[in-house]
Image (cartoon, rainbow, N blue to C red):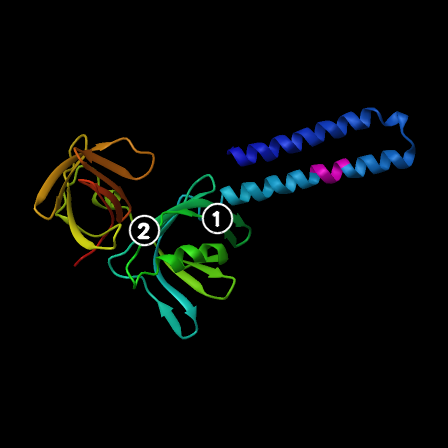
Amino acid sequence: MNGRMAQVWWAGLTVALGAMAACKGKDNLKPDEVSAVTKKDQYAIDSARMELDRASAATASELTGSTWRLVQLRASKDTVITPEKVAVYTVEFGTSGQVIVVGGCNRGGGTYTVTPPKGLSFGPLATTRAMCPPESMSARFLGDFAQMRAYEIVAGMLYISLANGAIYQFAPEIDIARERGVGDEEPEIIFACLDSAGTSSRLFARFQGTQPDQVSIRRAKKTVVATQVQSGSGVKYEAKDVVFWNKGRDAMVSWFGTHLNCSTTKE
């Protein structure tokens, strides 16, 4: 039971105990007063139960624990907007109502709520404020979360609709580590990266498949071997002056003082 559900459960229990106490003293009340107290307490108990049911449904939704990558935004019947090739746009739905969003050169976090059957809303997002390239859709993407109202999963794709009728389409994110398998050594994987100023570059990573796991990272004329460390989310590798945090096909990289948002590419 998560914190939110525990609070609701405790509230319901408190109301129920209060109702029982009220019933014990009802001999001192007039018949119409007994009826009013009973109805009032029962209403409170029923409301608490309904809130608990909503919280349970939200935490058990099909979105829980999933990560999705933006494919396109259908802003209107004739307008389709696709993200710039070198940028990362993802939504990660946590298991306790938390959401992590990557929007181009900015990222943020907040909360989400699923209202059965297909209602979806987000609380205010706390985001970074880096200056993205002129062609970036970062500001629009992050701002639109306040307008998201419902979702559908069709043929493995996630569609989130906005109050103004626009629809975002997402594809499921695939975990690189799970794809390659434990102990397998892969050829270099190419990452397209953006720094906080919007400058693009390429980073090359080769997973070693050792114990503990290591990754050889190459950027420009430098190559660093980083070792896996404990992480609460994704797979994290560290070396002197370098942090490589891989989740799905994306990576957050600290490279000798430069912070990069990266995503795999075949180019």
Q: Circle 1 sits on which residue?
A: 124
Residues shaded magenta: 41-45
Percent x, y of residue 14: 67, 29
Amino acid type indicated by mark 1: Pro
Residue extending furthest bottom? 78
Amino acid type indicated by mark 2: Ala
Percent x, y of residue 15: 70, 31
Q: Is residue 76 left or right of residue 32?
A: left
- Can the viewer see residue 17 in this picture? yes
Q: Is residue 90 above or below residue 162?
A: above
Of residues 78 and 152, the one drawn nearer to the viewer in this rendering: 78
Percent x, y of residue 187: 12, 47
Q: Quadrant of residue 71?
A: bottom left
- Which SS does the magenta portion mostly show? helix
Q: Is residue 242 magenta?
A: no
The residue sitting at 55% across, 51% down in the picture is 116
